[in-house]
Each structure stands twice: as C-alpha cells, then as structure tokens.
C-alpha cells in the first residue's frame, strides 16, 4: 500500500483542517495517510498572545523520515508570500536526503492558506514547489478537473498549483466545503499517482 505523508505547519488551524481533508482523499485512493507537523519555533508566550491553536494532535515529524514515504504533500500558510519559517527550518534539515537522492522520483505537492485573496497563494505554492524540484520529486498540482477552482459566484480558494483556502484578515474565515474538497482531491490525486509510480 502506498504511504503518503501530509506534512504541515499551522498557527491557527486553517492548514490543519486542510491537512485532514487531504488525508481523507489519500485514503479514498486506497493509500495510507500519515498526518504530521513540523516543530513550532515561536516561543510559548508569543503563541498564547496571538491565540495560536496549540492543541494540534498530529505528531511531530523528523526530517529524515521523509524518505520513508511514497509521496509527500506539504501544507503551509503564507508568510509574506512564501512558506512559513517553521516549514523552511524543517526543510533546511533535509540535506542528508537531498545528497543521497532519497526523494528523487517520488510525487509531491503543496497546499496553502493566505489571509487575503491576493496575499500570495500562488507565490507560496510555486516557491515551495521549487524546493520539491531540488529534491527531484515529481510535482503534483491540482488539475482543473477539480472544478471547484473555477467557481466565480463566491470567494473561493484553489489554483492549479495546489489547493488553497483564505483565513481572512482576522483569521475568522474557516475553509469552506469547496476548499476542503479541493484539498481532498489533491490528496487523492497525489496518492493515485504515487500508487502508479510505486508499481
Ligand atoms: C508573519 C505573518 C505573515 C503573513 N503574511 C501574509 C501574506 O503575505 N499574505 C497573506 O495573505 N496573509 C499573510 N499572513 C496571514 C496568514 O497567511 C494566515 O493567517 C494563515 O494562512 C492562516 O493559516 P493557519 O491558521 O493554518 O496558520 C501572514 C501572517 C503572519 C503571522
């Protein structure tokens, strides 16, 4: 059975919700889903001050374990149009995997969340994809067959580069069903490709 790691960072829980939706999609494809987080780097008193969601049940991943999976889906919120520093710090500890070609040929994708509609979803996805390409991974986006991304009658995330959601300036907006569907789609799509590449 193909093993897919959904590796995420989330301060307030939006990406956490998307991660579990993606895991559902992985399972729909008949693969095994593992949801893990990267370590927090913000001090506890700051997390309390910004009312971060600290009750996140996913275990913490170790950088070296990325090689143990048949596919990787990274979830990271936008920070100034890029991945969150917590994810960057984690990925910067994967040099051993890079130098040994441990991830070459495995499928991988990215999903994200921004505060505002045009706050950098695509730059975050594409700049994170650059990292995946340095690993030699096969990039899996969100095809337009995930038709939720063409919705025009309401504010909706989604892009061909990966599933997205929008938190709102104050973080009060939660992922809507269409956005969770897209995360699920991306998880299923990635797992289906991982299964084919594994055969
Ligand atoms: C330091 C910092 C930088 C941010 N930069 C952006 C940004 O460039 N564009 C944007 O739309 N939102 C930005 N945001 C908002 C976050 O992307 C948003 O709160 C996050 O996606 C919520 O996801 P989470 O609940 O999973 O952490 C920023 C938030 C912080 C704390």
Image (cartoon, helix red, strand yellow):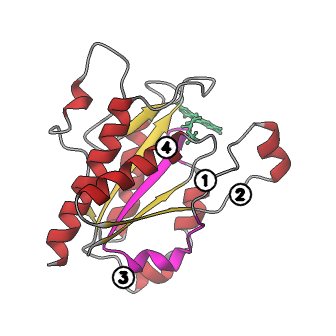
| Region in magenta | 59-83
Secondary structure under badge 4? helix
Residue under numbered circle 1: 85
Q: Which mark is residue 61?
A: none
Residue under numbered circle 2: 41
N-terminal label among 3 and 2: 2
Q: Are marks 2 and 4 in contact (CB under 8 Å)?
A: no
Residue 121, horizontal then vertical, whole percent: 42, 36
Q: Residues within 10 Å of mark 1 (few under 14, many from 20)?
A: some
N-terminal label among 4 and 3: 4
Q: Which mark is residue 102?
A: 3
Estimate the spatial distance between the alpha carbons at disc 1 and disc 2, rounded to whole Å: 8 Å
Residue 60 included in the magenta stretch of the image = yes
Q: Which residue: 19% across, 61% down? A: 192
Label 4 CB less than 8 angstroms from ligand 1: yes
Query: Looking at the rendering, in which quadrant would you find the C terminus?
Result: bottom left
Tell me: 197 left or right of 71.
Answer: left
Residue 54, placed above or below residue 134: above
Residue under numbered circle 4: 17
In which quadrant of the rendered view does residue 142 lie? top left
Secondary structure under badge 1? helix
In which quadrant of the rendered view does residue 118 lie? top left
């Amino acid at each position: 059975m193909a093993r897919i790691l959904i590796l995420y960072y989330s301060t307030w829980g939006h990406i956490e919700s998307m991660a579990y939706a993606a895991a559902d999609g992985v399972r729909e494809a008949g693969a095994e889903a593992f949801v893990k987080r990267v370590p927090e780097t913000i001090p506890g008193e700051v997390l309390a001050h910004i009312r971060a969601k600290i009750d996140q049940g996913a275990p913490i991943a170790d950088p070296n374990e990325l090689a143990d999976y048949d596919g990787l889906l990274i979830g990271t919120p936008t920070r100034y149009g890029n991945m969150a520093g917590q994810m960057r710090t984690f990925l910067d500890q994967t040099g051993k995997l890079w130098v040994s070609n441990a991830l070459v040929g495995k499928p991988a994708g990215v999903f994200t969340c921004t505060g505002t509609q045009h706050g950098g979803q695509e730059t975050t996805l594409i700049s994170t994809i650059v990292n995946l390409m340095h690993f030699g991974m096969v990039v899996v986006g969100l095809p337009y067959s995930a038709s939720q991304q063409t919705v025009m009658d309401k504010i909706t995330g989604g892009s061909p580069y990966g599933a997205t959601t929008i938190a709102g300036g104050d973080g009060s907006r939660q992922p809507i069903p269409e956005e969770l569907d897209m995360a699920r789609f991306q998880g299923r799509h990635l797992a289906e490709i991982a299964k084919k590449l594994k055969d």
